[in-house]
Image (cartoon, rainbow, N blue to C red):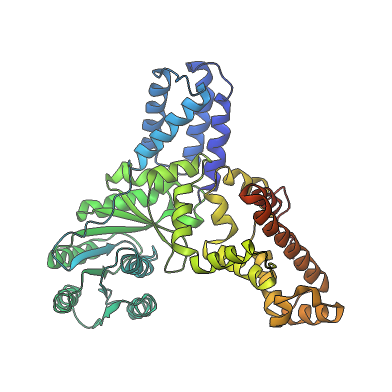
Amino acid sequence: MFDSLQQKLADGLNKVQGKSRLNENNIKGALKEVRGALLEADVALPVVKDFIAKTRMRALGTEVSKSLSPGQTFIKIVRQELEQVMGRANESLDLKARPPAVVLMAGLQGAGKTTTTGKLARFLKEREKKRVMVVSADVYRPAAVEQLKILADEVGVTAFPTDTGAKPEAIVTEALNEARRNNIEVLLVDTAGRLAVDAEMMDEIQRIHAALDPVETLFVVDSMTGQDAANTAKAFGDALPLTGVVLTKADGDARGGAALSVKAITGKPIKFMGMGEKTEALEPFHPDRVASRLLGMGDVMSLIEDVERKVDHEKAKKLATKVQKGVAFNLEDFKEQIQQMKNMGGVASLLDKLPGGGQMMAQASDAISDKPFLQMEALINSMTPQERRNPDIISSSRKARIAKGAGRDVQDVNRLLKQHKQMAKMMKKMKKGGMANMMRGLGGMMPGGGMPPRF
């Protein structure tokens, strides 16, 4: 996420490292680099000008703290100004209204409204423990109605049936009444989109808004459209009382222009980011955490939350007990670790949230891939239960059979067995020497220390 902007900001900020004090001369070059990085990231020009002016004024008027170097002080200022541009803190949905609280989803066609509606339904059901109903008001695209029904079934929420021959405002009014009868706490309303803003679309969504009087009106926008996302959000904001923005496809956005422009141009907070295609891939937008990622400081809080939510704690506890008892770490355990990592979003997602992870990915981009892990998992799946539990019995003939079953070569099986032995040694170190020894061992799996071999 925002890899390109992150790297260019790092290049600019490096220009003030090692300076004895902050002055106009030594921040000039850094600010020029930062300005260029923001413009290249497609951040709106007025936002860039305001950001640079405020950063310069604060940097020149700041007394350097005794506990921070001038370079650290400058980075702290840039971070705080980035947070200010994006909105000081996460703003959650206001669902305190008398049930059902209505959330209206608006945006252009192709921005990801329907998918985001499904993701938000899952988020509210699982994390907020709400009873949720979804309804599509898109009478022009039966496929969108069917897609929302499929998503609702997948995440386990109610989908109100849409009669595509009825008027959108009549559909949503009926859905609202049904939600009331069934004690639904949140009603999510997906609306029709167009390829561009037009009067007909705005008139229709205004009628829907009037019929529902929603507590939240969210503008869903593709973050990869850069500052155009902010301009389109403003157009919708002029027609509707927007309460917030959802940025979709943020995981594929290397620039970050939308994230840094939307709040400043519309005055509306970014409430969520779509971080992938799966229904669980929706994250609350935390400006402070995004600012940390942009400056290469990682996002440890989000990583901790991911561990709490996505790691199977029963399986992790079982493995820890096994290790403490000195029971051998076998290939079934190894497969469990690969699956846990996949649940966390894979190698790139983990590194993106670790301090310095962005630079690590930039330096070893070819080596950072989930593909080797997936191929190792395929090889383990090609083994018998006995072979997984006792890898020492895997002879040459067994290796040939395993490789053929996974569509790989025998040398790939050899690499897997070698990697497993390294992990088994690591687990022994964890038992004998504690976490410090284990972390030293894990260094061997990171870029530069030898990532899992490429298959």
Looking at the image, how many numbered discs can be counted on the residues?
Answer: 0
* Residue 154 shown left or right of residue 24 in the figure: left
Q: Tell me where residue 374 appears, x and y as whole percent.
A: 65, 69
* Residue 341 shown left or right of residue 396 in the figure: left
Note whether 340 is above or below 84 in the view shown: below
Between 280 and 15, which is closer to the camera in this rendering? 280
Q: Tell me where residue 284 appears, x and y as whole percent.
A: 37, 55
Residue at position x 37%, y 77% in the image: 147
Q: Tell me where residue 390 appears, x and y as whole percent.
A: 74, 75
* Residue 337 shown left or right of residue 119 in the figure: right
Residue at position x 22%, y 83% in the image: 165
Residue at position x 58%, y 34% in the image: 11
Q: Tell me where residue 254 appears, x and y as whole percent.
A: 52, 50
Between 57 and 438, which is closer to the camera in this rendering? 438
Determine if residue 446 is in view: no
* Residue 334 shown left or right of residue 218 in the figure: right
Between 115 and 356, which is closer to the camera in this rendering? 356
Note whether 18 is above or below 203 in the view shown: above
Determine if residue 396 is in view: yes
Q: Quadrant of residue 341?
A: bottom right
Image quadrant in which the C terminus is located: bottom right
Residue at the extreme right of the image, as rendered: 396
Residue at the extreme front of the image, as rendered: 325
